[in-house]
Image (spheres, rainbow, N blue to C red):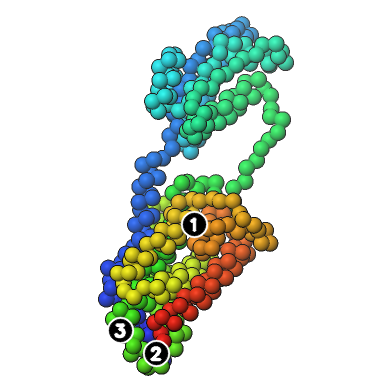
Amino acid sequence: MKLMNIISKSLKEQVRSYWLLLLSVLMGPFFIFIYYLITESSSPDYRLLVINNDSGTTAEGRQINHGSILLSYIEAFKSGNTEVPFTMKITDNRDEAVEDIKNRRADALVILDPLFSQAIEARKSNDTSILSRVEFEGDLTSTSYLISAVWANEILNEYVLQATGTQRAIQVKETALGTSGAAGEFDMMVPGILIVSLIMLMFTASIAFVSEVENRTIIRLKLSRLTATEFLGGISIVQLLIGIISVFLTLLTAVLLGFKYSGSLLTVILVASLTSLSIIAFSLIIAAVTKTAGEVLVVGNFPMFLFMFFTGAAFPLKSNPLFTVAGYPITIQGVMTPTHAVSALNKTLIMDMGISAIIPEIIMIILLTSIYFAIGGIMFRRRHLRLT
């Protein structure tokens, strides 16, 4: 009965602090919208410049220029593959092309030499005496150049194979896990932002705990012989509900903006619930070292930023494992539960893996949550729940 009273009281207190509640619940959808705008405004468009110096050749009594045919092939390839993220521009001035690359108006320059057609026609008859050189020029430290060059080289090789009537010695097949093959930059960010929406519980939960101390209502609660488990459990249940609502609103916003997920929603709820409990547990530690909501807002900023920016939640983050346990990598960031939660949601929402694939992440979240609760519970009880 006391537990239900605490839940009811905590709900009323949370509604009274509606600005803080709105901040926690709407932060996830806000981040999703911002990241959507960023990715949409910075969609990749790699610019390729081509100089066709091919002199052409005579084959079967007719003049042929494989360089010109290649340019038409590139245009046709791009038109038939809308996901190809580059544009091509033909030029005949190398100096101007290089200036464009230096000034970031273009990403890569491809130069066909005069022997291009002769080499292809010779290869048809297995004559390897004529060698054509295709030159790629650009900033080798630029990711844009590397991607442009890879696309151009792949299309060039495909054209040469078709023009000479030869086949690849090795056929490469790529199989995407889940929706990862169709996932864009925005889609890859969604699992992390779902966890960001839960990290915001660090403020609402800490303030929910410490407000009882600040308002001195903790004295009446202690005199009522309320147990620490009832007090902490009642507030935790309310914060857990807020966390689940926040995740649903964030995921709904992402879906409305075009996010296509795979996997089970029940698995998402499970991961979100466990992560919410872990954040609530860590909030106990913050509440134990503070006495007012103002102190929470100051002290809580440091762990909040650690949880957001050093776990892969707000931005993708990869680090070398310190060691492995049963094949599962343990990193420095692994002491923070969002690290494992982001990994679990990536496997679920992007790679369409079942719950069996995220058992290591679930075990780590439960283990860390237990440690957080043990430390936070002991600290909070000793500082704020003692009668003496």
Residue 7 visible in the shown view: yes
Mark 2 or 1, nearer chain start = 1
* Amino acid of disc 2: Leu
Are the two marked residues, 2 and 3, in contact with CB atoms closer than 8 angstroms?
no
Q: Name the residue under label 3.
A: 216
Residue 81 in percent (x, y) is at: 50, 35
Query: What is the spatial separation of the Cα atoms under label 1 and label 3, in whole angstroms?
Result: 36 Å
Q: Mark 1 points at which residue?
A: 311
As drawn, is 270 to the left or to the right of 100? Answer: right
Sequence-wise, the earlier of marks 1 and 3 is: 3
Tell me where residue 7 sits by quadrant.
Answer: bottom left
The residue carrying mark 2 is 387
Residue under the image location 65 percent in, 13 percent down: 131
Give the residue at x 45% y 77%. Answer: 379
* Count of marks placed on residues: 3
Label 2 Cα neighbours within 10 Å, binned few <14 / some 14-19 / many ≥20: few
- Viewer-closest of 380 and 346: 380
Residue 24, given in percent of the width and then of the height, sits at: 35, 66
